């Protein structure tokens, strides 16, 4: 029992450190954890990985909210979370996200027997139509833009898709390193480059009651199921689709997005258990263990860690905001860009740096053209769409 507690807290600690580093993709962590699977007992390894993944998700909201803040005057499509931060309600946005993570963990655990039945059925039923669902999702992404923005979105989707076709099976960099470089360039650095000038708006950190929309939580779990079943469909695209369907306010959309993140993480592991299909880096990391025998232990570690992580994250955010509000945001963004560049060179070398440069140039275009940055998810969606359409290209 004491060793489980140790690995829980150790996983929370490592996950928190990794979550606070902007630009570090969770898949990079899971890749590094493979070696530990041979050094630890299976149950200890599962507890450690579950705690790390949960803590990483919780603490990642701090840099997501406060270290990639756009300028409201230059970015047309600001994320709901950033809207709240610009209004001084960033701490409320963080609280909504953390509560949503906790509630989704409890609900999925309570419905565990149901998901054991539903997931294999959904996977078997939808597999022949994956390319149809993905194509429909692409059309929705494009036609949510207005006027000439639809043309821009379609072009960005195709260009980023070609980038995915060329690089994902590259002989110069491994798949994980390509993901790290391209996702950093497409979605990480552009937000920092176009970050707001001056000081961050004063954030209200007083404790206040937060209303949680359980309809938003339910939609988030459904979205997590969809993103877990459809390869290449990320949480952002599913979140966009749900926001269009629900027509909800910013707080509810934020709750749904956090719910999608947690549901996708947990249901990807359940997909591994029930169908032997790997849908995430976490699932791939756990596939080296007998996760089927330890699924209750896994959820126990998740429930414990999400509670502990939320408490730590809640109090850490207060101190973090008190510090960051005194710093010139533009200078901070430049410092973060420098740190990420060093990380890219250390992890991936000059080829990775070149790939980051290309993908950053592409990632800047949606901001300049006033279209949603999710258009660049063609990087993952187009190769997957062609694969499930059984279109034979040189990369396959």
Image (cartoon, rainbow, N blue to C red):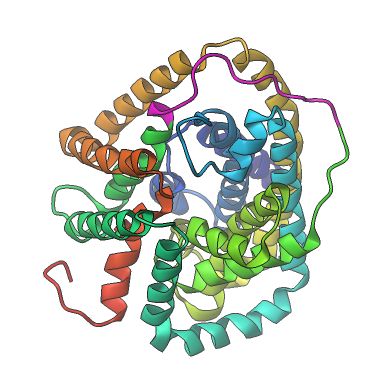
Q: Residue shown at 41%/49% (left/top)?
A: 371
Residue 113 picture quarter = bottom right
Residue 52 place in picture, x, y as percent: 58, 45
| Residue 333 drawn above or below residue 276 | above
Looking at the rendering, the stretch of residues picked out in magenta corresponds to 192-207
Residue 277 picture quarter = bottom left
| Residue 203 drawn above or below residue 393 | above
The image quadrant where one finds the C terminus is bottom left
Residue 340 place in picture, x, y as percent: 36, 28
Residue 106 place in picture, x, y as percent: 77, 61
What secondary structure characterizes most of the magenta part? loop
Residue 215 picture quarter = bottom right
Q: Residue at the right extreme?
A: 209
Q: Residue shown at 16%/38% (left/top)?
A: 351
Q: Verify whether residue 253 appears in magenta.
A: no
Kindly tell me whether residue 147 is visible in this rendering. Answer: yes
Front residue of 114 and 287: 114
Q: Verify whether residue 197 appears in magenta.
A: yes
| Residue 366 drawn above or below residue 161 | above
Q: Is residue 377 left or right of residue 304?
A: left
């Amino acid at each position: 029992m004491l060793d489980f507690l140790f690995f829980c807290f150790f996983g929370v600690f490592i996950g928190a450190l990794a979550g606070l580093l902007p630009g570090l993709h969770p898949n990079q962590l899971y890749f590094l954890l493979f070696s530990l699977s041979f050094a630890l007992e299976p149950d200890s390894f599962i507890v450690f990985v579950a705690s790390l993944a949960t803590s990483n998700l919780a603490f990642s909201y701090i840099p997501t909210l406060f270290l990639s803040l756009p300028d409201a005057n230059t970015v047309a499509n600001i994320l709901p979370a950033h809207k709240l931060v610009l209004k001084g309600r960033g701490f409320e946005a963080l609280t909504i996200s953390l509560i949503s993570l906790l509630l989704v963990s409890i609900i999925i655990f309570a419905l565990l027997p149901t998901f054991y039945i539903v997931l294999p059925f959904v996977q078997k039923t939808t597999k022949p139509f994956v390319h149809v669902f993905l194509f429909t999702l692409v059309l929705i992404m494009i036609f949510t833009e207005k006027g000439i923005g639809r043309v821009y979105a379609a072009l960005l989707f195709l260009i980023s898709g070609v980038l995915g076709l060329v690089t994902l099976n590259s002989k110069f960099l491994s798949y994980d390193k390509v993901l790290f470089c391209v996702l950093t360039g497409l979605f990480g650095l552009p937000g920092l480059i176009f970050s707001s000038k001056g000081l961050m708006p004063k954030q209200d950190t007083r404790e206040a009651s937060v209303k949680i929309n359980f309809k938003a939580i339910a939609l988030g779990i459904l979205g997590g199921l969809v993103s877990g079943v459809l390869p290449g469909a990320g949480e952002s695209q599913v979140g966009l689709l749900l926001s269009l369907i629900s027509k909800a306010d910013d707080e509810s959309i934020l709750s749904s997005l956090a719910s999608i993140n947690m549901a996708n993480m947990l249901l990807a592991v359940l997909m591994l258990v029930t169908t032997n299909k790997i849908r995430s880096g976490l699932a791939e990391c756990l596939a080296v263990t007998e996760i089927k025998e330890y699924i209750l232990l896994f959820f126990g570690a998740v429930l414990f860690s999400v509670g502990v992580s939320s408490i730590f994250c809640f109090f850490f955010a207060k101190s973090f905001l008190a510090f960051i509000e005194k710093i010139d945001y533009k200078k901070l963004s430049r410092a973060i860009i420098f740190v990420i560049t060093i990380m890219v060179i250390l992890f991936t070398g000059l080829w990775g740096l070149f790939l980051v440069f290309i993908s950053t140039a592409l990632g800047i275009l949606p901001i300049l053209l006033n279209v949603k940055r999710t258009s660049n998810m063609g990087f993952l969606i187009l190769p997957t769409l062609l694969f499930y359409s059984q279109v034979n290209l040189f990369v396959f």
